[in-house]
Amino acid sequence: MKWNRFTLKTKTEAEDIVICTLAEVGIEGVEIQDKQPLTDEDKAQMFVDIMPEGPADDGIAYLNFYLEEDADTEAILKDVKAALEDLRSFVDIGEATITESQTEDKDWINNWKQYFHQFYVDDILIVPSWEEVKAEDKDKMILHIDPGTAFGTGMHETTQLVIRQLKKFVKPGMEILDVGTGSGILGIVALKLGAGHVVGTDLDPCAVPAVSENKEANQIEEKSFDMMIGNIIDDKEVQNQVGYEKYDIVTANILADVLVPLTPVIVAQIKKGAYYITSGILDVKEDVVVKAVKDAGLTLVEVTHQGEWVSVTARKD
């Protein structure tokens, strides 16, 4: 089956009201394409490895909507154009031209899976649910990770750097805190290495079902990995829930600009002798994070590199 795709050209400042107008005539699920830069608030809510520079905003937005092949497109487009003309009388919506093209009925939700296959991080095998473990790998340490479309797979250098540090420092029964948990991969690795309990925090509520599914896939007991949603940096309630002087290891695979304000907060959460393992740091930001851990009174233990990425490990003495 194919779909008819219609692209409406408008102004970025009018895209919200145009989308509402489309909804009023029965068109929902509009896809937005524009060059609006992320706000500082948007950036603060994103735990990503690097924030790329986008193209300059040209004030133009393209709104894509889709109709089935057998839909009465003539009648629907007539309603759309009439609604847009009414809207134009009090809002500048730009050209408001509509072009038509066709697209295949692909499974967009699952199409990305073709790019994620099982792989090793040293001697740890990470396998998605849609692939079988080979007979020769049955005796390996195996993680079954389904990242979904929102979280990391473990393929990125930053995650691998933290996994290697966990292999060095995790001891049986340790209490672990993972800030910016995402798919839960670091917490699950820690538990597989013998840790006793993990607490994860994240800003995105989608992390809760993602971690839950990955715990189940790895036969992780429910009580051994707890999730909390909130910003541990400035939310006192989250800090209180997480607890103080409690953790043997804290992992934070985030961004250097987030690690700087996070580090002095984490000092209060960890035990004396505990390790603080950070990543998500571009090499040009290495000195910034090293300074942050030293300024917080932590002892620098090790700095490791993979490609252009850096992991900084420190200890509370």
Image (cartoon, rainbow, N blue to C red):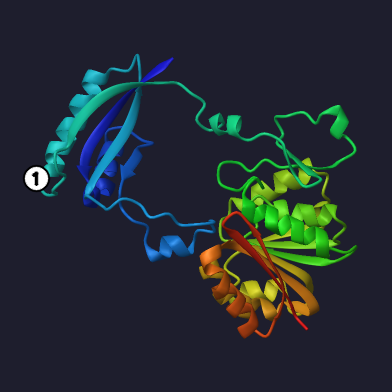
Place of residue 295 in the rendered image (x, y in percent of width and height, measured from the top left): 61, 85
Q: Is residue 199 left or right of residue 239?
A: right
Which of 279 and 199 lies nearest the eye of the viewer? 279
Tell me the residue that label 1 is attached to.
89
Q: Quadrant of the C terminus?
A: bottom right
Residue 234 visible? The answer is no
Q: Residue at x 85, y 34 (%)?
A: 137
287 in relation to 20, above or below: below
Q: Residue at x 85, y 66 (%)?
A: 174
- State which quadrant residue 25 falls in: top left
- State which quadrant residue 93 falls in: top left
3 in relation to 214, above or below: above
Give the amino acid type for the residue marked by disc 1 in the picture.
Ser
Which of 277 and 226 lies nearest the eye of the viewer? 277
Place of residue 46 in the rendered image (x, y in percent of width and height, measured from the top left): 50, 58
Q: Residue at x 25, y 24 (%)?
A: 100
Place of residue 61 in the rendered image (x, y in percent of width and height, measured from the top left): 26, 43
